Amino acid sequence: MKKNVLTGLALLISLFHLIPFYILFTTAFKELGDFSSKWALPSEFSLENFSMAWERAELGSAFINTTIITVFSAVLLIIIGSMSAYPLARRMTKLNNFVYMLFLAIMVVPPLTVLVPLYQMVVDWGLMNTHLIAILNNVTAFLPLTIFLYAGFIRSTVPKELEEAARIDGASTVGIFFRIVFPLLQPITATVLIISCVFIWNDYQFAIFFLQDADVRTLTVALSSFFGENTSNLNLVAAAALMAMLPMVILFLFLQKYFIAGLTSGSTKG
């Protein structure tokens, strides 16, 4: 009986979370002149909103910019984060513990608190409206969390015996990390990828300040162009939002088994 109640509650919560997606779907496929209730299915499914949204918001360019920023940011996060976490996890010195706690402290600092000095630095360095500043900003923002996840995984899951055996065979620290440790970090790497990519892909608060030119604006900034002081077109926004969310949905579906495994599986196999 208790199990059935919990299952029913889980289904109810899932349905509740699906409501926004249902409204998004019905709005995206309705014709521009269809003013029926948001709960009603389109009287006639139309793809006109998708083509209009793609052209008006220049989503092709926005997709390219967002992909460049997300991919380079994720790659740097994985490389820098994993390499930084390894000595912090294995060498428990006072200095390393202090650095690790410092990263934890940085995680609780609201990002917008550094907006004013960061904006002034970006202007002084001439990095406004460049992919570089977006990549650097994302890497800096997510590096503490990345190091925290990798360090915790290495400490609790990666066997030290494998590293000791490789060291006896004459392997260097760098060789041990890339040949033995890093291949075992697959589950947590998938977790880092999903978490960081979703947030970077959907970033708006910093993109609106640093990527204002049409040539470098991201998807979130492009979507905001549909809203004006006196007008807004929800049909086009819904269509554009559906297109914008597809890459992250595909990424999650592709990595979900590793994401679910997370911090516990696969580290001692082989």
Image: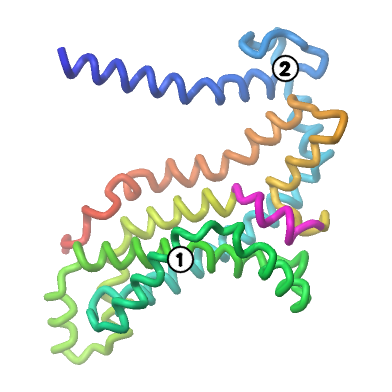
Q: Position of residue 92 (x, y in %)?
A: 22, 79
Q: Is residue 236 left or right of residue 2?
A: right
Give residue 42's mark: none
Mark 2 or mark 1, whichever is nearer to me: 1
Is 43 part of what is drawn in magenta? no
Residue type at mark 2?
A: Lys
Q: Position of residue 163 (x, y in %)?
A: 18, 79
Q: Is residue 64 left or right of residue 88?
A: right
For image coordinates 35% across by 64% down, the residue present is 148
Is disc 2 placed on a helix, strand or loop? Answer: loop
For image coordinates 26% across by 83% down, the residue present is 94
Which comes before the other along the chain, label 2 or label 1?
2
Is disc 1 placed on a helix, strand or loop? Answer: helix
Q: Position of residue 39 (x, y in %)?
A: 61, 11
For image coordinates 33% across by 84% down, the residue present is 174
| Magenta segment main secondary structure | loop
Q: Is residue 141 above or below residue 4?
A: below
Q: Is residue 194 above or below residue 73?
A: above
Residue type at mark 1?
A: Ile
Cα distance, mark 2 to mark 1? 45 Å
The N terminus, quarter of image: top left
> Which residue in the rendered view is the most extreme toward the bottom?
170
Q: Is residue 204 above or below residue 253?
A: below
Q: Nearer the viewer, residue 251 or 133?
A: 133
Magenta residue span:
202-212
Would you identify the image quadrant in which residue 209 lies? bottom right
Q: Which residue is mark 2?
A: 30
Give residue 106's mark: 1
Would you identify the image quadrant in which residue 176 lies? bottom left
